[in-house]
Each structure stands twice: as structure tokens, then as C-alpha cells.
Amino acid sequence: MSSCIICGKELDGYDIGFYRKMVNRGAQEYACIECMCKKIEITEHQAWEMIRRFQKSGCALFPEKGKNDR
């Protein structure tokens, strides 16, 4: 499992998907949602709203609701 390049937190599929969507789809290292929010100056609530919209639109970067990402 990967860890955040900024704070060291263990990452899940949402962290990785959000980083890839916002920064670089081919990234090999990632930041957690919390650190990304600070970097791009949005709230975590705004980030989760964006993730829900991406999921509804069928974005393959995010795990399906209710399923494990691994």
C-alpha cells in the first residue's frame, strides 16, 4: 500500500484516484485527500463532492460505493 508523499498517511483508492484525477493520471506517488485539499485550496467537503460527481459520471479512478478498493 502507498503512503502520502506529504504526511505519510496510508492511502486508499479514493486518495490515489483523487490525486490522479487532479494532478497526473500516470502518477506513481500520491498525496492523501487532506494534503491535496490544502495544496489546491479547497475543503475536504468540496473534494468529496467532486469525487461523488466523478463516480456518477463513471470515472474509473474511484472505487464503487460500498466496495473495497483492493
Image (spheres, rainbow, N blue to C red):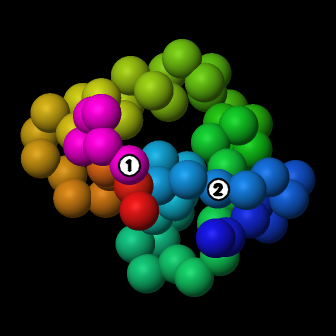
Q: Which mark is residue 11?
A: 2
* Mark carried by residue 19: none
**According to the image, label 1 marks what residue?**
68
Q: Please tell me in which quadrant of the rendered image residue 44 appears.
A: top right
Q: Is residue 56 left or right of residue 26?
A: left
**Which residue lies at the image location 86% right of the left edge and 59% below the top edge?**
8
Q: Quadrant location of the N terminus?
A: bottom right
Tell me where residue 59 appears, x and y as whole percent. 20, 52
Q: Is residue 24 left or right of residue 33?
A: left
Magenta range: 64-68
The mark closer to the camera, 1 or 2, is 1
Furthest residue toward left: 57
Q: Nearer the viewer, residue 37 or 5?
A: 5
Q: Are marks 1 and 2 in contact (CB under 8 Å)?
A: no
Up/down of 67 relative to 59, above or below: above
Across and down, in percent, residue 42 comes to 61, 27
Residue type at mark 2 is Leu
Cα distance between the residues tagged 1 and 2: 13 Å
